[in-house]
Amino acid sequence: MQQLKCAEILNATEGKLLSGRDDSTFSGISTDSRNIKEGDLFIPLKGERFDGHDYVEEALAKGAFGALTEKDIEPDGEKVIIKVDDTLKALRLIAAFYRSKFNIPFIGITGSVGKTSTKEMVWSVLSKKFNVLKNQGNFNNEIGVPLTIFRLEPFHEAAVVEMGMNNLGEISRLTSMVKPDIAIITNIGVSHIENLGSKKNILRAKMEILEGLNKKGLVILNGDDNLLFGLKGLLNFRTVFYGFEEGLDYQAYNVRSLGEKGSVFEIEINKKEYEVKVPVPGIHNIYNALASIAAGVELMIPEEDIIKGIEEFSPAKMRLDIINSNGIKVINDAYNASPQSMEAALVVLKEVSSGQRSIAVLGDMYELGEMTEEAHIHIGKFAAEQGIDYIIAVGDNAKSICKGALSMGVDKERVLKFENNKETSKFLGSFIKEGDVILVKGSRGMKMEEIVNKLTS
């Protein structure tokens, strides 16, 4: 991070200097008193179970040069103390100011599913030409995005920022910091429908990304998504669509599955045909590749380099990560789950198993509200339709998954349910045999990587 002056912080936040000098400088921003470095500005945040203000004194003692506060606190000698109305808002305002120091292309990515994989693939493509910053891990919320922005250095030439949300207004606040030059929306699914009520509201929430978009910027949308394609001709921005349907700006055709090794498709770019290999399985990864191609073309990366960037892509941890261990194949997709991503993972399981015994270990999907039971029944049915050999459901909604599978005529012996990961792991320990292919997937709160760890240990 480049140094920030106290006067710049005061100006960005409209804060009041309680102590210290306005010509002081900070070499970093931290919201965690446990990770303070010498010269940091500590920004205490408030959560349901904690208040960062309780750690201001500790942060200053550890070497922070100053801190923000919403409370009246005693000055600490020469340390900078700045009072603001809202520390989370102040974090956002400082990030927006810091972002303004960099005249480089920013790509903002949102959507119901596929955000992280798309971010990673766009990063892989852009890295063929630029030194690119991206979010680390799941730093895609109102704390993670500003902390990502603060990692910008003078050597960065582009940035790819994933933006997540749970409610209306969140993407609006994120895009006010990121101010993207390219906005990608992967799809509109039912993730977070418990909070937002309908897919139309989810669309509204995702469309907030355009509030911060450069007026000369580009919107890249999934043209196979009916809600997104319905925006054709309605946006005040240059817009391109990608997908498998005829007439889209970036259309994949002649698609061939390579099983575990991924897939191949053809595409026309600038009136010339190319073959593209996606090195990971799943049709959804072709969508990610198409979005990446559109971003690469916009940033004038040579087509050959775009294709090479896609071929060099590797998935993020716990996202359809195929692990060969002890004679079995484990598809670790334990990072999160929604009905759409569950379907995609089950299709991959069927492709990868290819004659071997297929086992789907499926956990609860969260934040589905009134759709919860229906969605889990649907996944049970979908798994049965794919011809998965054994369907193992885990968690509070396991009964609904099993109900769906059994309604399709699957033998009772092939449909099992367990209350928790420990019970599931114990059963699998004696059930699996050499050659099995096992998908493990559930929402983040299910922590189903515990099952993966048992299977691969």
Image (cartoon, rainbow, N blue to C red):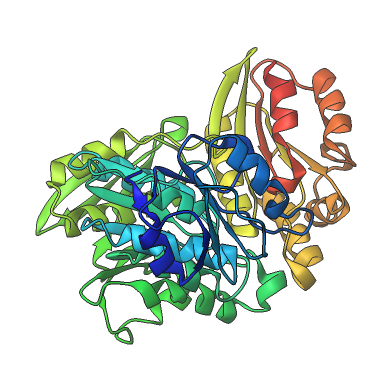
Residue 425, percent from left and from top: 82, 27
Q: Is residue 445 visible?
A: yes
Q: How many discs mark residues in the rendered view?
A: 0
Q: Decide if residue 111 is in sight here.
A: no
Q: Nearer the viewer, residue 34 or 360?
A: 34
Question: In the picture shown, does residue 411 fall above or below 89?
Answer: above
**Snapshot quadrant of residue 326:** top right
Q: Does residue 300 appear to the left or right of 20 in the view shown? A: left
Q: Between 235 and 244, which is closer to the camera in this rendering?
A: 235
Relative image position of residue 367 (x, y in whole percent)? 72, 63
Residue 234, located in which quarter of the rendered image? bottom left
**Residue at horizontal 48%, vertical 43%?**
40
Q: Left or right: where does residue 64 sit relative to residue 279?
A: right
* Depth check, front residue: 302 or 325: 302
348 lies above or below 298: above
Query: Is 79 placed left or right of 102 in the picture?
Result: right
**Which residue, as the protein is rendered here, is positioned at the far bottom?**
234
- Which of these two is toward me, 317 or 85? 85
The residue sitting at the top extreme is: 326
The N terminus lies in quadrant: top left
Q: Which percent across, then down, holds residue 408? A: 77, 55
**Residue reaching furthest left?**
271
**Residue 50 in picture, x, y percent from top left:** 76, 53
Q: Is residue 189 above or below residue 114?
A: below
The C terminus is located in which quarter?
top right
